[in-house]
Image (cartoon, coloured by chain):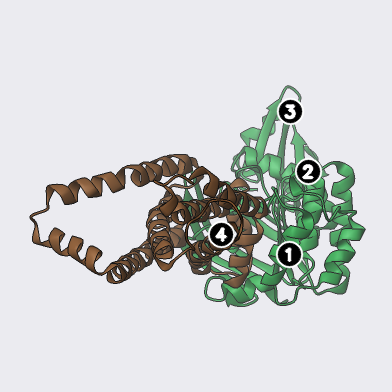
């Protein structure tokens, strides 16, 4: 399992340079007041997602699954390692963003205004797991030919989901469930974050089981 | 003779192709050639052994163990070379080695570097910048660096020039001298196998036609030539396969040369069949030869 994880890191040495470059760029690109509070999240989500996509695409390029499954590994290990890689990439992207942010804070440059915090980490974790929990089963089921389509669909979800959710909450302000949710988030952001994390952990587990079921039956 | 691979009643249905009831016993310490025309089922059989394709029914045991239940243990002892490169093209030879090596308990870096030197492989060059022959050499170096007892090669010589093909065959011949290895080698270039294989399995249209020691096969099969009028004799034609009729007469393959020799000695001419002849005539038509 650790060898598979190590492989997912080694296959994308160029992407790691991109991640480092992007983590610097993002502070400049989103230095205005509107975006600055979200700079850590925007940076970490983008870097994690690119690293995951890059790991998946490196297998697709040469149909390297044929090599992986000819090695002494089980199919469930290949899938489990991919999900474990998601967590590792999130952690790496948060550490990178945190360190770059700290360096910028020590510099005479006027940004950022704060250090990375646990809320940045929680929102990054929830967002990336949400995306990849949809992405990976779709990738295992549909394969490389549909990868671009999957990416576009996910991008649309990321783009439109927040406004749709806010619109839904506004339209259902009188609902007891909605009121409880809004109150909880406002009054107890820690609890809200933990609820979010527990929900995506459940989603990730379901996603893993679906991917595993697909991959176990797959002919290469 | 201890079998290293046993296949019983193996079936696999794919789009437009059916591997039917394959039974094989591969003895240890031999070079086994799997031959057959393109699309006959050679790669499908190899992929099923490696569990890259899921079998519909049947049993496969490698080193006496079920190939799925003991998949990891079995694959520790298998080296593989496929017809195309499936390693990471964007990485160098050494970077690919760093990915693959930790998976094997018996990986030996010294052996790998000896092969790198022997094959003249540029360690720092990316795979995408290597020729097809170099990529095959790299795959072979990986396959031979973890003390694998069974080397499975799927069309390793296809697309290679004759010089490298010869080099590869010499390497395999050298490998067999210590009696520790068994090689399964699928190809449609039969001349490669006539040089090195001890045992031949012929697959055609998803079915095993025969599996036997090379000398027995070459002894058994003959190309028969004679006058067209002889084809009217049903007893005679029942012993033929892949009959070609031309203006001078007919040509066919037979596996019953002794019977033909006895009964039709004066009316036919027989020549030793090559593996190519056997594939060609068998693929052309179903007979009883």
Question: In this view of the protein, which residue sits in the foreground, A108 or A141?
Answer: A108
Q: Which residue is mark 3?
A: B249
Residue nearest the viewer, comparing B258 with A156: A156
Residue identifier under label 1: B98
Whether the residues at callouts 3 and 1 have beta carbons within 8 Å, the answer is no
x%, y% of residue B231? 65, 34
Query: Which residue has dot 4 on it?
Result: A105
- Name the colour assigned to chain B in the rendering: green
Residue matched to label 2: B129
Query: Looking at the image, do the residues carrying marks 2 and 4 touch, with CB atoms under 8 Å apart?
Result: no
Which label sits in the foreground, 2 or 4?
Answer: 4
Question: Marks 1 and 2, Cα distance to the nearest angstrom?
Answer: 19 Å
The brown-coloured chain is labelled: A
Respond whether the residues carrying marks 2 and 3 are from the same subunit.
yes
| Disc 3 chain ID | B
Relative to B116, is B128 on the left or the right? left
């Amino acid at each position: 399992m650790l060898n598979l994880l190590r492989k997912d890191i080694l296959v994308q040495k160029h992407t790691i340079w991109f991640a480092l470059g992007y983590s610097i760029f993002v502070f400049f690109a989103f230095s205005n007041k509107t975006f600055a509070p979200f700079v850590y999240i925007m940076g970490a989500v983008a870097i994690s997602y690119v690293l995951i996509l890059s790991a998946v695409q490196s297998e697709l390029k040469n149909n390297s699954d044929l090599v992986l499954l000819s090695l002494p590994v089980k199919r469930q290990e290949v899938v489990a390692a991919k999900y474990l890689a998601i967590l590792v990439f999130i952690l790496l992207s948060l550490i990178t963003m945190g360190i770059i942010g700290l360096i910028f804070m020590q510099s005479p440059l006027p940004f950022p205004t704060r250090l990375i915090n646990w809320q940045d980490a929680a929102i990054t974790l929830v967002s990336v797991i949400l995306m990849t929990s949809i992405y990976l089963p779709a990738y295992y089921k549909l394969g490389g030919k549909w990868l671009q389509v999957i990416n576009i669909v996910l991008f649309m979800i990321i783009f439109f989901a927040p406004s749709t959710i806010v619109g839904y909450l506004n339209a259902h302000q009188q609902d007891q469930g909605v009121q409880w949710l809004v109150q909880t988030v406002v009054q107890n952001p820690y609890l809200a974050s933990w609820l979010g994390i527990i929900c995506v952990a459940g989603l990730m587990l379901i996603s893993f089981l679906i991917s595993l079921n697909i991959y176990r039956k797959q002919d290469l | 003779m201890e079998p290293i691979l046993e296949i019983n009643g193996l079936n696999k249905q794919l789009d437009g192709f059916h591997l039917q009831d394959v039974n094989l016993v591969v003895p240890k310490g031999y070079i086994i050639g799997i031959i057959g025309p393109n699309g006959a089922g050679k790669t499908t059989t190899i992929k099923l052994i490696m569990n890259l394709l899921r079998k519909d029914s049947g049993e496969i045991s490698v080193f006496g163990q079920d190939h799925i239940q003991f998949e990891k243990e079995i694959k520790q002892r298998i080296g593989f070379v496929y017809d195309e490169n499936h390693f990471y093209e964007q990485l160098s030879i050494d970077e690919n080695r760093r990915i693959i090596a930790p998976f094997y308990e018996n990986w030996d870096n010294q052996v790998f570097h000896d092969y790198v030197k022997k094959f003249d492989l540029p360690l720092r060059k990316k795979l995408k910048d290597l020729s097809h022959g170099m990529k095959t050499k790299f795959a072979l170096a990986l396959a031979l660096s973890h003390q694998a007892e069974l080397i499975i090669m799927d069309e390793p010589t296809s697309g290679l020039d004759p010089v490298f093909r010869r080099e590869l065959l010499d390497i395999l011949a050298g490998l067999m001298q210590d009696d520790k290895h068994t090689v399964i080698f699928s190809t449609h270039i039969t001349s490669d196998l006539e040089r090195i294989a001890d045992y031949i399995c012929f697959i055609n249209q998803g079915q095993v036609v025969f599996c036997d020691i090379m000398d027995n096969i070459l002894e058994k099969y003959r190309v028969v030539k004679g006058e067209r009028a002889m084809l009217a004799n049903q007893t005679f034609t029942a012993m033929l396969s892949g009959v070609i009729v031309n203006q001078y007469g007919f040509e066919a393959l037979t596996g019953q040369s002794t019977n033909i020799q006895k009964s039709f000695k004066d009316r036919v001419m027989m020549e030793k069949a090559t593996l190519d002849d056997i594939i060609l005539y068998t693929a052309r038509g179903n007979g009883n030869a």
